[in-house]
Amino acid sequence: MNAVTFNNVEHIYNEKSPFEIKSLNGVDLQIKKGEIFFICGNTGSGKSTLIKLINRLLIAKTGSIKVLEFDMNTIKKPFELRKKVGMIFQYPDNQIFETRVKKELIYGPEKFGMSKREALVKIKESCVLAGLDYEGFKNRNPFELSGGEKRKVAICSILAYDPEIIIFDEPTAGLDNSSILSLKKMFFKLKEKGKTIIAVSHNIDFISECCDKICLLSGGKVIFSGDFVDTMMRFTNKELEVFGVEKPFIYRLLEKIKFKDKDDFKEKIKNIENLFNV
């Protein structure tokens, strides 16, 4: 079953003005429930527009969008939608607004109808997932935290109200290797809980280790959508540069090696990973 379906979606900024820009053009896309789904593309490809349409921060010009049980063409009030679809911005300062971490974390759960007792349980669960020490941070001002700590607060503030779909915009930006490893573990734990994860990213190594499916955008169009291995087989490293990514080392190495089919390709990847103990 699909969590998100786009059918022939078009979006235009500054329509009927000298600054008109068509950001999406005839987009068809399906994201299944429970997937870890990555979106890649260069600046101006339509990535940000696409994820904002999923959370109805923007409205499509034409076409249809369905998110879970919500038809975005007929929905009048997006409150119930946003209860089920959470978005974590690339820059935490654009998301955080309270003066204490505990107030930031409880805002969403209470806004969406949780009791304080239930909210506190969810907040502590989200802090464990994101690696944030709730007791140590709850009385601190989030604007005085480091960039990585702010990122964790922003993640926890969304996870705390338990949405079904979680959207991440450049989740690895500014993170060190240890934090990226923790983020990867969190993605898998969320997947185990049945959550659908949608992420915009250029970190191809992170994508290769996490994703179920990947979508390549260029000029407001979906050029390809499929599993990671299919994507690596279909495109050369030079072709992927159009989307702001490059193949991981192992896949670049395999471009020089002949393989029979997809299964043979996967087997060679496994052998190389074992050789280098990746």
Image (tube, rainbow, N blue to C red):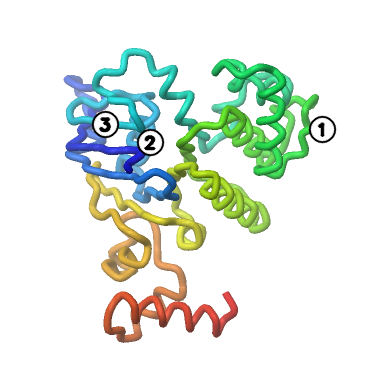
* Residue assigned mark 3: 65
Image-quadrant location for residue 127: top right
* Residue assigned mark 2: 51
Q: Position of residue 123 (x, y in %)?
A: 68, 30
Is 184 positioned to the left or the right of 235 in the image?
right
Q: Residues within 10 Å of mark 1 (few under 14, many from 20)?
A: few
Query: Along the line of sight, which residue is nearer the eye, 137 or 189?
Result: 189
Cα separation, mark 1 vs mark 2, equals: 33 Å
Q: Position of residue 61 (x, y in %)?
A: 20, 25
* Residue assigned mark 1: 135
Quadrant location, the C terminus:
bottom right
State yes or no: discs 3 and 1 in contact (Cβ < 8 Å).
no
Q: What residue do we see at 66% from left, 43% from top?
A: 129
Which amino acid lies under the numbered mark 1 shown in the image of this protein?
A: Glu
Q: Position of residue 108 (x, y in %)?
A: 58, 22
Of the image marks 3 and 1, the number of the one nearer the N terminus: 3
